[in-house]
Image (tube, helix red, strand yellow):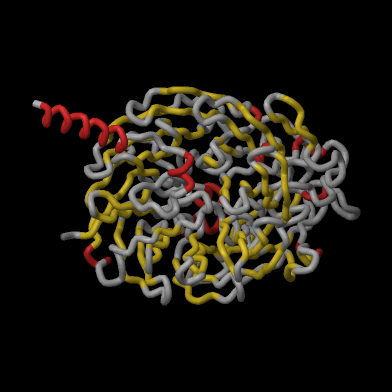
Amino acid sequence: MKRTLISLLVMAATASVGAQGVTDAMIANDATTTDNVLSWGLGTQGQRYSPLTGINGRTVSKLVPVWSMSFGGEKQRGQQSQPLVHNGKMFVTASYSRIYAVDTKTGQKLWKYEHRLPEGIMPCCDVINRGAALYDNLVIFGTLDAQLVALDQNTGKVVWREKIDDYSAGYSYTAAPLIAEGLLITGLSGGEFGVVGRVEARDPKTGKMVWVRPVVEGHMGYKDGKENGVTGMTNASWPGETWKTGGSAPWLGGTYDPKTQLVYFGTGNPGPWNSHVRKGDNLYSASTVAIDPKTGQIVWHYQNTPNDGWDYDGVNEFVTFDMDGKRMGAKADRNGFFYVNDAATGKLVNAFPFVKKVTWATGIDLKTGRPNFDDANRPGDPTAAGGDGTKGKAVFSAPGFLGGKNQMPMAYSPKTGLFYVPTNEWGMEIWNEPITYKKGAAFLGAGFTIKPLFEDHIGSLRAIDPKTGKVAWEVKNNAPLWGGVLVAGDLVFWGTPEGYLKAADAKSGKEVWKFQTGSGVVAPPITWTEGGDQYVSVVSGWGGAVPLWGGEVAKKVNFLEQGGSVWTFKLMK
């Protein structure tokens, strides 16, 4: 009897430990632990690197699907979610603000939460969601009507719900939230509607606001409900009243580096696209901002595209890594340049094109950090002398506004020292038009047509050396690449719109495996171990910005079918 009682107590204690909530320490160690995936980016640095080597060049031929779960219903569209894994459960979001809990071994759906969306939501670039955050016993995600919802991981019941902003004014939320320093840190979407971009920090257990930092110059920040200083200086880089509808939405989400203790967010396009109505640099749009999570203050900023006139944004993820004994951060920007900055100070260390054609600037001055603009390639002012006031001079610009790289996250391998970047080669004819702000209406002031640059490919996965800018290898793809990348040991995994999840050797680029998922892959893969087995998962479901905004490119891929499912693989024994 005594032995049985002791055994029961041990089993109960073991079960309690196994079912513990997600802690700050667990999140801090996410990049090195392999039995879970607790953050977007497989670690808050966003490297998307796993040290797992069970699936490798010798064994990958035995990689087979073990289960697939459909999101169901008629709500397909783009599926860009990166799943999270904890305590035998996978948490994965889907289009139209849905989230599922799934048994990691069987694919059985454990619960589903479907957010009730109002009429009139205005997502710019499809009804997507990029993932959730885990903290304690909660799973937290954002919705298309600009809310944050925290659910119990075991039951799917709502624990708290907080409004980010007014969806009728164009605000929405599509990113995976970031957990750093015990805070839930988020941006927002809606830059095409003249919103005011900002980064916010909340208590993840309650949703209570801790601080707010606007990323449009001239707006007041807040901490603990009190004023916390204006961002920059009013009217310093925005003329007149333009800062009040400045856009600059940090819509992709952020990263956090434990060594610098800074949070990094990329900011989006200034509003409107027509740059002639807002002459000046338009801080802090199209930039990387480094924020102290303890104070909510901007520590440094680096502007990738001052006075952006091409909708290049600057939201691309800032991935921190070690180079020459220093902590650096890398960003493959939509504007076609790859940047390396000192992660502690923001000082520009290196910058080079990572796509084959860039027309808006001839290069980046490494001393000043500013681009060398080609003024002839800026779309013309529709109010300039000699015009009819309805349309400015059109120019052909490359990359197109969908970017040399868009939302699809890159990966970094500390083993090879290379970044693995999903790139696209396209350009656009673009022109400016008169525009005035109206709440809830598109705030562009521009017209455009996207066009491919080459006959044999649009997308290309490139292995890039951040020191030299050299491309170690590339794998071309007929359709645009719109999904993210994972490095697991010596293999690189990525998906294609044609439906394939692929794997290649990280050093040579030689393709060693592929699997057809049935719909386009526009999401990043993950990997983890459970019960002695290594798993790989990816979400499949074609959609996103390309079929909505892609012009001639969209016509080239209109044969692709929509879908919505999660595929999970392991080695056949």
User: From this viewpoint, which residue is outermost toward the left?
Assistant: 1
Q: Is residue 234 placed above or below 344 in the rendered structure?
A: above
User: In the displayed image of the protein, which residue is found farthest to the front?
Assistant: 2
| x then y, percent, for residue 109 | 27, 35
Residue 450 in percent (x, y) is at: 60, 58
The residue that appears at 74% across and 58% down in the rendered structure is: 394
In the rendering, at what x and y percent does residue 90 appear? 34, 41
Name the residue at 33% across, 29% down: 154
Q: Nearer the viewer, residue 199 or 97?
A: 199
Question: Outermost residue, right direction?
Answer: 385
Instruction: Indicate the quadrant containing the N terminus: top left, top right, bottom left or bottom right.
Output: top left
In this view, 348 is above or below 416: above
Give the percent coordinates (x, y) of residue 10.
Answer: 22, 34
> In which quadrant is the C terminus drawn?
bottom left
Q: Is residue 194 visible?
A: no
- The residue under the point 69% across, 38% down is 295
- Marks counted in the figure total 0
Tell me, yes or no, if residue 559 can be seen here: yes
